Image (tube, grey):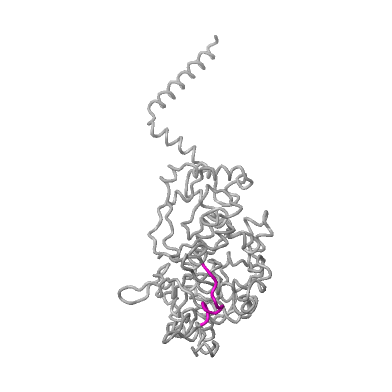
């Protein structure tokens, strides 16, 4: 063996000896830390490591939001909202979206265990907030159609706010509103209007937010966990028969329909056209889409099919409330700017009112009368956001045209229960609906919207839809 070879051999043994000593000196916790750093130095590595997410998560700030009409949203911890796991994550990884790099949709920086660095470089939590950039390359038609979708824009609500403020109609009018008022809208109203992801990937904000199924892309949203999360008391709860004294909608009990059986994906996505009121949407469902020859079904239909909407006879008591989403009132009396407000000064109640149709130019056909529900707004709804009173509040009624999702065949207007508890038809078609004098009282008067049912600040706004002076003289109420 040459001298050179011997020296190289001895040098190698020395290096190995010192490395071994270093390994023996190294703290086992340091080794574990190095192992962890290697395992979480990527987007997927971090978000699939539940214990690590619990360690590095940023706690939620104290909430200033009051419960909405659906009650308190369920709370999900920050690490639960972003954890990738379970069957949903397996489904996601096996699909086309799971083949994409995380940064392709979310931006940010991959290949690091540094949370701040990972969430830099224009990181975006919800890529569908910019659908033209993140979704249109694969879904151009849907993105084009949703540009003016009510689901995405909330254009009906925005239009009502801008009209009552006095700014006119349209999205441009809303954008012209004072900054603080728009900030109040975002805090109080916008949480139920969302993006593609809110229906297909995450829980809606009103339901606590976050991933609901390990990032799986759900083609057909679940009715209860998605639709009803936003469409609560005046949609889902009515359909499911949640309210006291109500039963589920016949379309659920008899046909087993979910929302998309009537509300097609084309309607939900939109047709690309701006509308300032949801009943103007050309793709909305109509009863006649399924129920043909209604006029010939019975004498009631023959007489009144074009007089008022179907729900006037076939829906149950319905959730109403008024003057909602207003700012909080501190003890000193000064209005405070808080997200969520303090709820309704006219508390939620189950009710039923028939009035003159406020949408004669929109509804189909142009019904003379319609079922109405009390809406949320009051003149001072935005006083905590710099607008003491909406100068053009009376531009629209406080009771709105409505089509409840709580349809049943036999109601208090269409029948009565016999001694066996079964519903039967009335002996005379008007017994359950027309106002009829009975001694000193007027039967059925409570079904109709009169001035006496309104608060003072509602009187002028609702003057065209109350029935005072507009009912048949022989009813004896004018």
Kindly give the residue lying farthest to the top in the view shown: 1
- Residue at 49% across, 41% down: 40
* Residue 90 quadrant: top right
- Residue at 51% across, 41% down: 45
Q: Position of residue 16 (x, y in %)?
A: 46, 21
Q: Position of residue 345 (x, y in %)?
A: 39, 75
Question: Between 277 and 264, which is closer to the camera in this rendering?
Answer: 264
Q: Does 35 appear above or below 66?
A: above
Instruction: Write the start and end of the magenta stretch as one range.
Output: 423-434
Q: Does 470 appear above or below 116?
A: below
- Residue at 40% across, 34% down: 30
Q: Quadrant of the N terminus?
A: top right
Q: Position of residue 221 (x, y in %)?
A: 57, 55
Q: Is residue 192 magenta?
A: no
Q: Does 379 appear above or below 187?
A: below
* Residue 401 quadrant: bottom right
Question: Between 410 and 217, which is closer to the camera in this rendering?
Answer: 410
Q: Position of residue 134 (x, y in %)?
A: 62, 55
| Drawn side of residue 107 relative to residue 77, left or right | right
């Amino acid at each position: 063996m040459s001298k050179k070879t011997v020296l190289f051999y001895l040098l190698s043994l020395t290096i190995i000896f010192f490395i071994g000593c270093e390994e023996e000196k190294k703290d086992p916790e340091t080794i574990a830390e190095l192992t962890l750093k290697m395992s979480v130095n990527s987007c997927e590595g971090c978000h699939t490591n539940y214990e690590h997410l619990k360690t590095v998560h940023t706690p939620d700030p104290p909430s200033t939001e009051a419960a909405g009409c659906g009650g308190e949203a369920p709370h999900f911890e920050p690490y639960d909202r972003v954890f990738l796991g379970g069957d949903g994550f397996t489904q996601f990884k096996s699909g086309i979206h799971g083949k994409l790099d995380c940064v392709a949709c979310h931006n940010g920086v991959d290949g690091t265990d540094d949370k701040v660095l990972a969430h830099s470089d224009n990181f975006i939590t919800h890529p569908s907030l910019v659908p033209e950039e993140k979704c249109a390359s694969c879904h151009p038609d849907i993105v084009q159609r949703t540009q003016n979708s009510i689901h995405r824009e909330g254009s009906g609500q925005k239009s009502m706010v801008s009209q009552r403020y006095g700014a006119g109609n349209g999205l441009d009018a809303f954008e012209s509103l004072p900054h603080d008022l728009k900030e109040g809208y975002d805090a109080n109203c916008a949480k139920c209007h969302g993006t593609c992801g809110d229906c297909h990937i995450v829980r809606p904000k009103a339901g606590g937010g976050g991933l609901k199924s390990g990032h799986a892309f759900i083609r057909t949203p679940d009715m209860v966990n998605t639709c009803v999360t936003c469409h609560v008391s005046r949609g889902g709860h009515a359909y499911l028969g949640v309210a006291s004294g109500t039963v589920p909608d016949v379309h659920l009990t008899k046909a087993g329909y979910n929302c998309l059986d009537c509300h097609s994906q084309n309607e939900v996505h939109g047709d690309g056209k701006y509308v300032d009121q949801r009943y103007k949407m050309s793709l909305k469902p109509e009863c006649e889409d399924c129920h043909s020859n209604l006029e010939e079904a019975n004498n009631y239909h023959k007489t009144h099919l074009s007089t008022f909407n179907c729900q006037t006879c076939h829906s149950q008591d319905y959730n109403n409330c008024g003057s909602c989403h207003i700012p909080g009132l501190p003890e000193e009396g000064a209005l405070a700017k808080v997200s969520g407000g303090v709820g309704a000064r006219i508390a939620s109640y189950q009710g039923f009112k028939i009035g003159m149709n406020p949408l004669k130019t929109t509804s189909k056909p142009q019904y003379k009368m319609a079922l109405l529900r009390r809406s949320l707004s009051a003149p001072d709804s935005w006083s905590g956001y710099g607008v003491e009173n909406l100068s053009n509040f009376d531009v629209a009624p406080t009771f709105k045209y409505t089509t409840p999702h709580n349809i049943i065949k036999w109601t208090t207007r269409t029948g009565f229960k016999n001694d066996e508890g079964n519903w039967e038809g009335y002996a005379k078609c008007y017994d359950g609906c027309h106002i009829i004098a009975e001694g000193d009282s007027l039967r059925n008067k409570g079904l109709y919207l009169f001035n006496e049912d309104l608060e003072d600040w509602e009187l002028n706004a609702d003057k065209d839809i109350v029935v005072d002076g507009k009912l048949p003289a022989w009813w004896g109420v004018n």
